[in-house]
């Protein structure tokens, strides 16, 4: 693929990552009002409505075979969002994204047998050791928050697997369909937690901005990039997302990470980037 053809999808992916992490910072302002569950429900629900209006996914034919990866993609998307936002209630944004990133990293390294790949595994494990309660550090991170972020990482791995399959069958419309499925999964949880408070007009403007910045815009851009970029280039670029998240947390939330926490984030970013650069293509 010519380098010039890569510029647009690379730019779209960078915008998507910046948008989603800035939106996550804004979303935390809603947590005291409707909690992480309610915020996730509104984000996905409003995002699904926006995508439905703009993409009109009902015009895309759906076969019995294509439903399976599409539903799996939507479920993975819903679980990823819910667990990630729940983790943000307990740990800083940059740390949550770094922990979440271990999901795609493990996915990339599955079945690896080369020495260099084991080096990346050890580097990522070192980063995790610095963050987990078993590490000798001053982080004092909440264990439940850590577990939720790691669970979001597992969902992210499935999001990548089924997102590629759904995108191959439905193109950009897969985002609208998948987000609708995710909203149907998560919205009852938010409604159960908040009741009628979920429909308060006072929180609607912020929730709408969060939905655009964290769902409608970035997932659409990611799907375009995912289908136009080589997997290795996509993975390398995605590797910088924990750094973007940490900077967003610092700028918008005042979440200052310790030197050890920055070292842990850097170790996971380096492991992810190294994996993407040296992974042996299949086939």
Image (cartoon, rainbow, N blue to C red):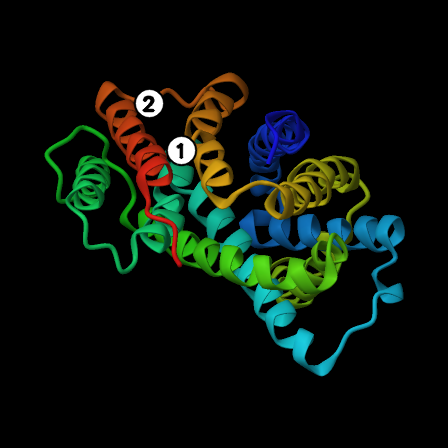
Dot 2 crowding, Cα within 10 Å, few <14, some 14–19, many 20+ = some
* Residue 132: image tag: none
In screen coordinates, is 219 left or right of 123? right
* Residue 257: image tag: 2
**Residue drawn at point x = 51 percent, y = 39 percent:** 234
Asked if the residues shown at circle 2 and circle 1 are in contact, with their CB atoms under 8 angstroms apart, the answer is yes
Instruction: Determine the CA span between mark 2 and mark 1.
Output: 8 Å
**Residue drawn at point x = 44 percent, y = 34 percent:** 236
Secondary structure of the residue carrying numbered label 1: loop
The residue carrying mark 1 is 92
Q: Nearer the viewer, residue 280 or 202?
A: 280
Picture quadrant of residue 170:
bottom right
The mark total stands at: 2
For the N terminus, give its image quadrant: top right
State which tag comes first along the sequence, 2 or 1: 1
Secondary structure of the residue carrying numbered label 2: loop
**Residue drawn at point x = 65 percent, y = 25 percent:** 4
Residue farthest to the left, as pictured? 136
238 up-or-down from 44: above or below: above
Residue 127 x, y percent position in the rendering: 22, 36
């Amino acid at each position: 693929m010519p380098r010039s053809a890569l510029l647009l999808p690379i730019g779209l992916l960078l915008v998507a990552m910046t948008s989603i992490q800035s939106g996550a910072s804004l979303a935390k302002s809603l947590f005291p009002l409707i909690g992480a569950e309610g915020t996730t429900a509104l984000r996905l629900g409003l995002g699904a409505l926006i995508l439905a209006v703009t993409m009109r996914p009902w015009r895309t034919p759906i076969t019995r075979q294509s439903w399976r990866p599409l539903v799996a993609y939507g479920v993975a998307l819903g679980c990823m969002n819910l667990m990630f936002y729940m983790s943000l209630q307990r740990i800083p944004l940059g740390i949550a994204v770094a922990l979440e990133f271990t999901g795609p990293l493990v996915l990339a390294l599955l079945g690896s047998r080369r020495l260099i790949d084991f080096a990346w595994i050890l580097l990522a494990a070192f980063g995790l050791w610095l963050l987990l309660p078993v590490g000798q550090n001053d982080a004092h991170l909440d264990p439940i928050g850590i577990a939720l972020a790691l669970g979001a990482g597992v969902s992210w791995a499935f999001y990548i697997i089924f997102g590629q399959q759904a995108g191959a069958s439905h193109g950009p419309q897969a985002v609208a369909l998948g987000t609708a499925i995710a909203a149907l999964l998560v919205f009852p949880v938010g409604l159960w937690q908040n009741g009628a408070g979920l429909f308060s007009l006072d929180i609607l403007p912020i929730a709408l901005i969060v939905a655009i910045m964290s769902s409608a815009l970035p997932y659409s851009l990611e799907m375009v990039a995912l289908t136009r970029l080589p997997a290795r280039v996509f993975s390398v670029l995605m590797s910088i997302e924990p750094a973007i998240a940490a900077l967003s947390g610092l700028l918008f939330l005042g979440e200052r990470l310790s030197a050890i926490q920055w070292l842990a984030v850097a170790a996971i970013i380096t492991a992810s980037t190294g994996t993407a650069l040296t992974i042996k293509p299949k086939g």
